[in-house]
Image (cartoon, rainbow, N blue to C red):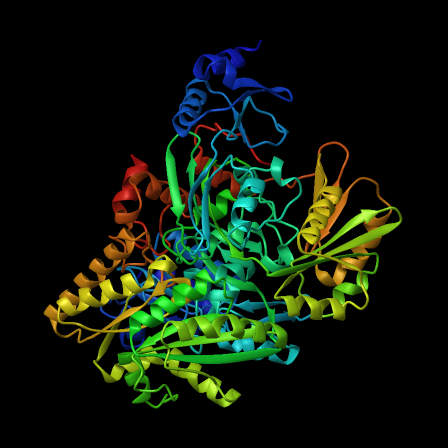
Amino acid sequence: MSDVRQLLERELGAARASTRGALPLAEPQDEAQLCALLRLAVREKLRVLPLGLGPADRKADFALSTRALVGVVEYEPDEGVITARAGTTLAELRTLTAAQRHWLTPFVAREEHTTLGGAISAGQSGLDRLRFGPLRHHVLGMRVALGDGTIVKSGGRLVKNVTGYDMHRLYTGARGSLCVVLEASLRLFPAPRAYAWVQSRDMALCERGIQPLIQALGRVDGGWELGLLLGGAQEVVAEELALLGDARALEGEQALAAARAFANRHTPEGACTHLECRPSALHEMLARLQGGSGRCLVLPGVVTAECEGAPLVAAPRALDRRIKQALDPHHVLAEAW
Amino acid sequence: MDPGLLRGLREVLGEAGVIERRNQRVPYECDGLAFVRQLPELVLLPRTTRETAELMKLLDEAHVPVVARGAGTGLSGGATPVAGGVLIGTSRMRDVLEIDAPNRFARVQAGVVNVDLSHAVEKHGLFYAPDPSSQKACTLGGNVAENSGGPHCFRHGTTTQHVLGLVIVTPQGEVLDLSEPRAEPEGLDLVGFFVGSEGMLGIATEISLRLSPAPQVVETWLALFRELDEACDCVSDLIAARAEPSAIEILDKLTIEAVESSVLRAGYPREAGAVLLLELEGRESEVAAQARIMEPLVRARGAFELRRARDPGERMRLWAGRKGAYGAMGRVAPDLYVCDAVVPRRKLRDLVRQTTEICRARGLKVANVFHAGDGNLHPNISYDRRDPDELRRVLEAGDEMLKACLAAGGSLSGEHGIGLEKLGAMEWLFTREDLAAMCRVREAWDPDCRMNPGKLIPMRACMETRT
């Protein structure tokens, strides 16, 4: 057993220390334990990789999962904002908010294995980004632990707020390199009253003037399949279906289930490459990716493709390094890039 | 100002770009926070990113503090000059650089006026969504600095959701080109962090902005209430019912009177105690569905009239009246203190009552015209800044209103920013550690804190990060 694993066991008890992949894994049960672990890392000069339920895919001395920090901190359905602890899964949040007629964005694959903190740290946008935009637009505020165990907050639980710097914008997508997310507030949207799911090989369906909730392409043998989730008032959905011609559709809960299955089928699970493309260059991009193997998900503006080995990543800018240094001067948290 | 530095700046900008004469600097001594004034040592008006970078290099070498300014319409003192510092204005950077209609974005210089962008892209069936009340004057660069809002941000989101890329000139005079419109940031989200940073990290000289397709149908509705309370409750009901208008605004009686007595007379009925201004947009079926959700809710809260603007002319007048309300208040008193706070939307009535009471108790005249759907209050106090006691009471009422909003789970600013105005209040909301983290990131961009010093983060918090 490694020295680090023993240190973690001493700190948390044997039940809370295990391994994930090649790394010892600590699962603190509350914020106090989590911050104590970070202070331990400062003292022992250890490098920490924060994560939720995902793989330990970067170098560090140990992984720190926020999985055990679960629960909703505040959800007033009539406000349209939910605040939850980092380890809560998106599936739990979706069930809770759907019951109150809210739509939770991002809509991602395998939500029962995706924590709120993990999705935010990964900057993971959903299949619903055509309608709602990227996740980072809807993170309203956060509480986080910095590398030295100091807890700080930014933003709030309000749909509109320009008080102080949007520190949470830096943390979103920083892959745990600036802080460990403890709790976050998300803006919710009214859930459509009706849904319809259309799946087709006909890419031209995107150009019929509809405004779907989800528009995504997944790579299949010899081409692409298009998934469209329509959502809105009953007559709006009916009208959009008519615009799509005689497309066969699933409706209501079945439509949502089909959208989930589509997301799970096409979202890469392992190492993947992210590509971007302007709408005008989409056809060219699709032609280039068509012959490849492995899963490939195309969302408006962003393509995620499974790749072999480690994905290519750009070297960090000098300013990114200075920001990292400013927030984590002891270099406790694993580098993101 | 050092003669060598002046000579260098003139070489970069030419004579027209360097304003030295005192009487020509006076217009720059304040922004919309008019009771705080400071004459800048020098006003510089670059035309390009390159010129901005060169002059920033010179100012960096000379250790001169810098404040950037768009149109000076900001309301929190974000563009108030600092003693001994220069002011960099973007008024000569007014070019729309690129319109890419198929990809729905535009690239503009920072000094382009907000509404001019929408006009420039209209022929493509597109528009730029964030619409601050000052949109006929305010610049997109200023909008970026303050993360500006506006009525239609209820549906479309504030400035930050529309900024796809930036060219930033750093305090050291380097050009950080992040202008390629990106769906997801590469590395840290520097663009997202910059928006709303109140001019303290650098100067954005070029902005890539998302354009939205113009909706097929737009309908503007007026709901008239006897009482402001009823209008507030109606908004909370609309939010609770998951209604999705594109704008939900409230104007109270005093505001209606001011607007209707001005040249902006829009046809707001003077007999109403409050008007709820709603806009619905989308496809016809969508708008019809929205109207069906809205109507019974509005009637149930006691609206004595609900009607739709008859034609585009009436729509335009209603909005011109709403957006010109601040100017119209000039009839009531020489000065207007536009407060800005944000509260949970289910508590609108309580907070509007409390803020009104706080003003009344101090003998102040308050009018409410605000972005109700976002919980963004604007209690506007009419006053005369030449009366020192009245000004004192105005500021005291401002503080008390903010405290009431914080106590209800609200925040200090929905769209005007902190600037100088609410600097002290930051410590009511944030801990020393919260502020120190902000300060450290600021120093990663601007180690000497020369960009817009003394704004947003109380000095004390910054001092502590250095010890």
In screen coordinates, is A14 left or right of A294? left
Drawn side of residue B187 relative to residue B92, left or right: right
Quadrant holding the N terminus of chain B:
bottom left
Q: Position of residue A329 (x, y in %)?
A: 43, 31
Compare residues A292 and B76 and report the one nearer the observer.
A292
- Describe residue B337's horizontal placement relative to residue A37 as left or right: left
Residue furthest to the right:
A222
Report how many numbered discs are placed on residues in the image: 0
- Report whether residue B295 is seen: yes
Left or right: residue B355 compared with residue A83: left
Residue at 36% in and 54% down: A163
Image quadrant in which the C terminus of chain B is located: top left
Q: Is residue B31 visible?
A: no
In front of the other: B27 or A128? A128
The residue positioned 53% from the left and 43% from the top of the image is A93
Residue B2, horizontal then vertical, whole percent: 32, 60
